[in-house]
Every structure is written in C-alpha cells, then in structure tokens.
Amino acid sequence: MSERNLDFDKVIDRKGTHCLKYDFAVKRGYPEDVLPLWVADMDFKTTSYVEDALNEVVSHNIYGYSNIQNGDGFFEAVAGWMKRHHDWAVYPEWHVHTPGVCFAIANAIRAYTEIGDAVIIQQPVYYPFSNIIIQNSRKLVSNDLIYDGAGHYSIDFEDFENKIKENNVKLFILCNPHNPVGRVWTKDELEKLGDICSKNGVIVFSDEIHFDFIWSGSHTIFQEIKPEYKEFTITATAPSKTFNLAGAQQSNIFIANEELKKKFVKEYDVAGLDEPNRFGIAATMAAYNYGDEWYEAVKKYIKANIEFAEEYIEKNLPGVKLIPTEGTYLIWLDFNNTGLCARELDDLIIKKAKLWLDSGKIFGKTGIGFERINVACPRSILLEALERIKNIMSDK
C-alpha cells in the first residue's frame, strides 16, 4: 500500500457530521455562517492507513467490548513512534490509556490533591486547565508568563517558586509546547522549573500533546531531563493532534513512579470508565505504525501555512503582531496595538468578519487583546480568514 491522503489543499465539507468545529456554532452563540478556525483539530483527511484500518474494523461488523494488553501490538506501536520521532524509550509498566488528555488532567487533580489544594499553571494557557481546576474545587494559581510586547514570552521563575511556597502548591500543569503562545520551552527553562518542583515536593503533569509539531528548536521530554524527574512526573501524549484523531478518544499517559501510577489508576477506576473502543485502538496502531509519510507531509504543509500567515499579516494587518510560532499548529495574534478593546475586537471578529476564533481572554487575563487561530486547514480557508480580518481592520 501507499499513502493516498496527501492533498491538503482539498476543502472537505465537515458540516452535518456531528463536527464540533462546524456544527455547533449557533448552539454556542455564533452566527450560523461563521468560518471556524478555533478548536485544535485539522481540516485534513488523516493518513489512508487509518482509513484502511477502520474499514477493516467496520467490515468485521461486531463491535463488542475491546481492550489492549502487552504484546497485542498496541503499546508496541506507541513505543515505536516515541522512539523513532523523539528518541524516547517508554515501557509498558509506565503506560495508562485514557480517553483524552483533559480527562487525564482531571484524573490527576483528583488523584494527587484534595479539595482546596492549590494547582499552578502558566497563563495565558489552554483554557480547560483552569476550568478543570476550578470545577474540581481546587485553588487556581497562575505563574503568568512574561510578555515583552515585541513577540516573546518567558517564565518568571522567581514568581513560580514564590507562588508554590505561598500557596503550598501540590500540582503543576506544564504545557510544552505551550498552547497558545507557541513557545517550545528549552531544556534549561524546563530544568529550572523541574528543580523548583523537586525542591518543593510538587507533582508535575506534563502535557506534551503538541510535541510532534516543532518548528524552532527541539522538543525536550520533561521527565527525561534528570532521572529524579521521573519520580514526580506524569507525561501526557496522544495521536489526536498529530493524526487528527481526537474523536477516537485515545491518549497515552506515562507514569514511571509506581506509587503515582497506582493512585492515578485507582482514581481512573473510580470514574467507572469502560475499555477503549476498537476503532480508536485500530486508528492509533495504524497511525503510529504506518503514518510517517503522511505526518511528514502534513508538517511541511502546516509550516508553509504558518509562513504564509506571517507574511500576509506583516504586509496587510498593521498593528497586528503574530507571536513567533515555535511549536503547535496554532498561531497567536496580538491586537493590542490596534486601538481596540477586547469587547470591540471580539465584536468585529465574530459579527463583522464572521470568524469563530478563540478569543484570548478565555486563556486568562493575560490573553486579553489576543486571538488564537488554527492554521491546520487548506490554504484557501486560511487566506479567506486573513482577508476577513484585513477587511474589518480596514473598515473599523
């Protein structure tokens, strides 16, 4: 067989497929004809090897209970991908399957903290982090990233440690690569965070779901920086971002410390979740075993989209700054020099441009005046979105 799904310019109609991105605009308060570039999934067909694997499952026509176990090929597929693309050796005794990374975060919060305990994050950051913390009756603490106003984000390490001590923080949710600001944290930056957490007894949940999309620098697996980091780290990965498989509900969590893993699994069992579905198992195995050609091609296309957006914004959107995208397929636009307040900006984007983006304010107060755009789409769609922004900025 050979890869068939490499035409990323093709526009595919996703409406009417129970698609969160396209079918729920009105329900969520947006115009019916809005163009959505918000939620982080792709508008591309995934690798044809996944397509073939799922067709085989369908043709079997029995969809009973399914599960995974050592030696059945599932973990071997996951481990093979990690070794080939990240030079990371993972082991079956570390592995826990979950239906998603957000589920795993909630599970970790309940497993490692008590009601009222403090959990620290670094805003502006993926908004479910704060939602999950608050919904589980924990105290939200933010070590806000430092924005220099010229396009660069950095970490305030002194503030990070002070807030851990002041709030007796029990858990840190790390986002690397960082969503939405696009930073790929350096080994030095991660080591500073890790040493602070080690010294203060803080467990680290390292969300590395975007680690297959690195444009500048290199990705560092947090738990591998020092041997002792494995003792307090939960590392979250998934094929969902890499192969557009979010609906398959397959995430792979790695916990080297046996006691931490036991607590995590115990809390997982309390949730009463059943076994992973056969479609997700087949899709994950096919993607990780055979999807390398598709992955390399989609990376090339997305990188070109980012470069296209950078050039377009520089030429056509005065006052708008695109934060350099070191990782992820999400770009982060700074509108703070356009003279628009956050309410005016959202009103223009939604009602006049008819765009459904992720408003920066949902990522925390430090995200006000920004917009997040998903560029994993055909270039014609990206161009349409950018031209709509250009038109409303010209008319304001």
Image (spheres, rainbow, N blue to C red):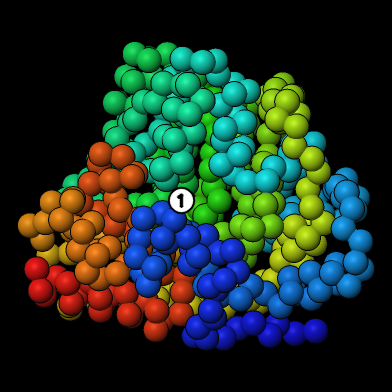
Q: Nearer the viewer, residue 49 or 303?
A: 49
Q: Which quadrant of the view contains residue 126?
A: top left
Q: Which class describes the residues within 10 Å of circle 1: few (<14), some (14-19), or many (20+)? A: many
Q: Please give left or right for residue 153 compared with residue 297 in the image.
A: left
Residue identified by numbered label 1: 177
As drawn, 141 above or below 234: above
Question: Could you tell me residue 341's position as x and y percent?
Answer: 13, 51
Does the rendering let one see residue 373? no
Q: Position of residue 270 (x, y in %)?
A: 73, 25
- Say which residue appears at 67% left-offset and 52% top-offset: 249
Whether residue 214 sits left or right of residue 166 in the image: it is right
Q: In the rendered view of the protein, which quadrant contains the N terminus? A: bottom right
Q: Amino acid at mark 1?
A: Pro
Residue 69 in sight in this render: yes
> What element does badge 1 sit on?
loop
Q: Residue at x 41, y 50 (%)?
A: 179
Horizontal side of residue 4 vs 7, given as left or right: right
Percent position of residue 143, x then y: 33, 31
Identity of the residue drawn at 54% across and 47% down: 208
